[in-house]
Image (cartoon, coloured by chain):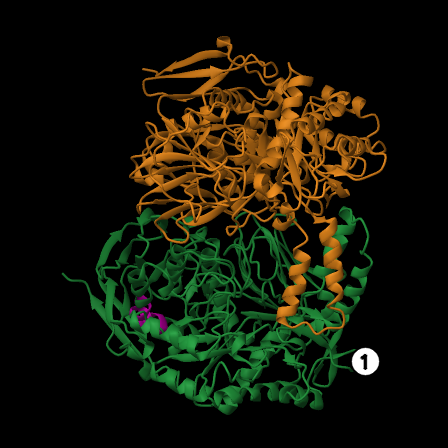
Chain colours: A orange, B green
Amino acid sequence: MIRRYVYGNVIETEAVLNKPEQENGALPYFTVDEQAMTLSYTMEDKDQIYGLGENVRGINKRGWYYESKCSDEPDHKEDRHSLYGAHNFLVVDGKETFGIFVDYPGIIRFDVGYTRSEELVITASDWNLDVYIITGEDIKDIVRQFRHLVGRSYIAPKWAFGYGQSRWSYMSADEVREVVKKHRELNIPLDSVYLDIDYMERYKDFTLNNEAFPDFAAFNEEMKKEHIHLVPIIDAGVKQEKGYDVYEEGLEKGYFCKKEDGSPFVAAVWPGKALFPDMLNKEAREWFGNKYQFLLDQGVEGFWNDMNEPAIFYTEDRLKDVLEELDRFKGQNLDMDKYYEFNGLVHSLSNNTEDYKVFYHNMNGEKIRHDRVHNLFGYNMTRAAGEAFERLEPDKRILMFSRSSYIGMHRYGGIWQGDNKSWWSHILLNLKMMPSLNMCGFLYTGADLGGFGVDTTEDLVLRWLELGIFTPLMRNHSAMGTRVQEAYRFEKIDGFRHIIGMRYKLLPYLYSEYMKAVLRDGMMFRPLAFDYPEDRRAVKVEDQLLLGDGMMIAPVYEQNAEGRYVYLPERMKLVRFKEDGTKEEEILEKGDHYVEVALTDVIFFIRPDHLIPMATGGQCVDEVDFDHPECIGFVDNVAEYEYYNDNGYEKDYENPAHITVLRMEAEK
Amino acid sequence: MIRRYVYGNVIETEAVLNKPEQENGALPYFTVDEQAMTLSYTMEDKDQIYGLGENVRGINKRGWYYESKCSDEPDHKEDRHSLYGAHNFLVVDGKETFGIFVDYPGIIRFDVGYTRSEELVITASDWNLDVYIITGEDIKDIVRQFRHLVGRSYIAPKWAFGYGQSRWSYMSADEVREVVKKHRELNIPLDSVYLDIDYMERYKDFTLNNEAFPDFAAFNEEMKKEHIHLVPIIDAGVKQEKGYDVYEEGLEKGYFCKKEDGSPFVAAVWPGKALFPDMLNKEAREWFGNKYQFLLDQGVEGFWNDMNEPAIFYTEDRLKDVLEELDRFKGQNLDMDKYYEFNGLVHSLSNNTEDYKVFYHNMNGEKIRHDRVHNLFGYNMTRAAGEAFERLEPDKRILMFSRSSYIGMHRYGGIWQGDNKSWWSHILLNLKMMPSLNMCGFLYTGADLGGFGVDTTEDLVLRWLELGIFTPLMRNHSAMGTRVQEAYRFEKIDGFRHIIGMRYKLLPYLYSEYMKAVLRDGMMFRPLAFDYPEDRRAVKVEDQLLLGDGMMIAPVYEQNAEGRYVYLPERMKLVRFKEDGTKEEEILEKGDHYVEVALTDVIFFIRPDHLIPMATGGQCVDEVDFDHPECIGFVDNVAEYEYYNDNGYEKDYENPAHITVLRMEAEK
């Protein structure tokens, strides 16, 4: 059951399409304090809190506070409160079990037992909230109802389930060709190569660096013959440059965000000074969305939207002020206080919350200051693209994922988990975010495998891939200036080929589970707590996940480890695929196990009477035979599997012909 | 066996006091490349590498590169290469087992299978190395020989094994009184309160803020009646201020580090512009050491030396240049490259390696550029103090620990593990550093419990204390601007009282093991690998430690966890002390166990036929009865324990009367 409670004058986010009538009574479970602008709930010791989408720390969010404030945050450390997304849905599980979604576009804080261990306190920035309380049979049912409320998740094309290689940046078509050639020569599967900001002409959206990427349409064609999709990046900021058509046109039409006085708001990002299209203005959104046609026309079938929190390196006005202020320090003896002031000034330039208070949107004719709707910006940039794709390419699935997001955006694209680091702890963070994102509707997601920032190591990339082969978005991406980390740069080529190859063998199961999760409002990745709520040990597990119907995964995330502990909430079959091509199966009893996992082993677990349909693999998704899956199963009696498959490009998702039931009986 | 090999003209570090004759033959195990300035060793797959003292990452250092370059590094992230210390000793364990100590005062890199997984490559900055190769019966024997080579470790007074409370900063005597009062009122034991930089008059060493701390000698006296020791900080930089005696005197005598032209090198730290005493100049060192008398005279019996890498906020010359350079950016449109240049300029101000190349030391009359001896600075600052204490207070043990260090400094003081963060991962880092520091002679050590930087949580402090009660230095410390974290600030007062109280019950064992480790060149904290080298599972354990003769510890380091996995390399007894005062014992078989550990439980394990002498506790070390220890044991047949105890203040360490043999027989 979903009940809706409204406080104040709500700004419409369009996260929910068919809103239930609002209730008149008191908000259940919570104490409401309008003065303090808080909703408070008293937890019991054993209560666990799930959700909040893209955030640091545990699957169980208890013991920290989180702030929904879309942020360009490159340091996903334990002490962060915000990442790129704003996902205000959580489930309280304990004495009471219920979900709460606070549909609110401004900055909002969730203190989950941080200030006082038993208090869950939600504090908004103003008192205009649309609050949904969801109850149901169990957590999965609550999530299902919530997901139905916010609408069906985005569906990616099948090729986007292949392995993607990215770098900030491949600087030319020849560099891209080299990446593809190396993978093909070494028989390391590959389906896409990502183009970061340098494919553009001086970081201008919807332009091409024609010297480095001459005849881009022909290059796309050439790559497609190799079964490779090029996926260019699009940034939120439009370069301020006389004669640049997107800038000139947007300016003329008044489509950019404006300052109080109506002049354009100028902030610097990659290209230097830039303007932000007013993504919250329906007409501007349509206009910006149509710009993607420039690249669709060249054969592009996928994009990633970046810098759309929006990130701000500095604003024109603030930089001027700061540089003048810095003059004050000349010739001075800076003691601690002054030195901190100096550093503070410089740090205040980037992503300064105050800068979100000096520009405005035009939402259906109403002028709204950005900070009140801050969390909707990235969402509506991606919506601009998604709505445009529906107009421009109605019969095609276009790959789209974004850095910033809000619930609602999940209907238009996926997200990647942002600018992580080549840290072992970020393998685990990647894992922990999968279910919380799934709860909020983000199913097409994954992290930058091998780590984006700082230098990686070979074993880190291998171990991370052993998780990454299971996530819908499987992309190896790394930052300028860091150690190169394409598979072929390392020594253990056979290992990379094996692990990445396993992704292609697993595709029938992974794609089927992804599609069923989308079409049935389910979670592809679940904490053990959701399926074994009565098992206190299972409830506390933070480093294993259930994946779809019949699989449990438990990757290794510690350097130099030769195995790891796994808790089995019931008897399961351990399946191990070794680099030498052999497969080992072992049935393990419910309970604790130390499982050896060699550096290039791929392992997973199968639940009793469940099947995992697999293929023989391929060098690209096109080569994978989805039509004749071979099942491996753990069958005590009889196992049946609802296998979803379609051609991966068309949109007749609901066609019942896509479902086949696979069946296996125990050998007697 | 220790063999010594010399390359080039070695700068004497005095890490080794009685050097063996140098060998003439080739360096064993390694390939030496004088041109590349490298020593290279080829590892096998299963080889593990231990040592390198204070550093991030694993007990097994394999898979990363480390750089010995004493650094003011507040972010102990996985990707760091250097922290505050330079500890060039490591043990290779595998097909070959040996130790190597590169006695070298400049910056030196240890690539432990980072660039190529099987290559250990040591790269110096110039070709003047004193290299020791140590072989022995086993790792413990190799470490013992090495420790004997570098001399006996510093011995702290007994009171310094009590619980210490610190904050940057307690701003007045009254704040300190409040801290003490709260602990005493709530019966939370306490032995010391640390004074951070604000006790001084505008951050000037050997001065007092007389307004905030009037009559400091009387205040010390008052605190001692409460069994509280005040422990002030001393910084490396001496404020440049006319009329300030330390500055004037040092300047007059030429005791500060100088630039090439002989003018004083001016760098800013806490007080603003400051000069660095030339700690490598024997006379200057003696002069600086004598300054501690100012505080000794007021009744102080302990110090911590800080900022002695040395940390540099900015140099006078560089700040001037940077501020002028920043002018260039006025009125410009900063694109990505220019924005990075701008940020780079500002970041270049602090701890810039280039600044270590513009000042000089006077070492026995020779002018030596700082970068060549960079890693000796903090060592010699602490040596200045240690040597002074021998002169000024020959019969007393003075507490001394430092942030920066080099091997050799372990004879004069301990270290704390630097400016960590309130991160769960830093509990584990704290644990992992204990044995690598012990290997290098640093026995009096511990981390800032609860975490120094960023906001903590109550459960983090509790769990961290459950490790901290075992480390010789047990101090809760936190940074300005972060959440206060004294035990009494939280809700679970009974839990804090219990956990901290357990420290005082464990003191007989902990002090005895510390003293035996010092006197016998042993390791108080050891990886399981050192005691169970044949047990491949034990060898890989990175989150448990052996503590002394008979104990194994395995703290919980994950938020919201209700227990953890423990690997037992042999049958052991689990002992659990609960908040309600009860004790539980359980014998567990060799192998894997999931052990429940409630939030305020204290647990440890006892090896078969071993004893742990304990006391009944107390509110301070003075109250602990060391003379009538009661043993808990795990006795199959008979267990004997060599119990070391002395009065904790005198220096007759070797007196055989300090040793008693405790004995327990199994009940038949």
Depth check: B609 or B506 in front?
B506
- The x and y percentages for residue A556 are 48, 41
Part of the protein shown in magenta = B502-511
Q: Nearer the viewer, residue A161 or B230?
A: B230
Q: Quadrant of the C terminus of chain A?
A: top left
Q: Callout 1: residue from which chain?
A: B
Q: Amino acid at mark 1?
A: Asp
Count of numbered badges drawn on the protein: 1
Main secondary-structure element of the magenta-colored stretch: helix
Where residue A84 appears, x then y in whole percent? 58, 41
Drawn side of residue A511 relative to residue A223, left or right: left
As drawn, B445 above or below B380: above
Q: Is residue A80 in sight in this rendering?
A: yes
Please determine whether, in this image, residue A12 is positioned above or below residue B172: above
Where residue A203 appears, as percent x and y from the top left, is 77, 38
- For the point 46% across and 56% down, the residue is B428
The answer, for residue B516, to whether it is visible in the render is: no
Question: Is A380 on the left or on the right of B188, as rendered?
Answer: right
Residue receiving disc 1:
B261
SS at mark 1? loop
Across and down, in percent, residue B352 comes to 70, 65
Q: Please tell me in which quadrant of the rendered image residue B544 appears.
A: bottom left
Q: Residues within 10 Å of mark 1 (few under 14, many from 20)?
A: few
Residue visible at 27% across and 75% down in the picture: B661
* Quadrant in which the N terminus of chain A is drawn: top left
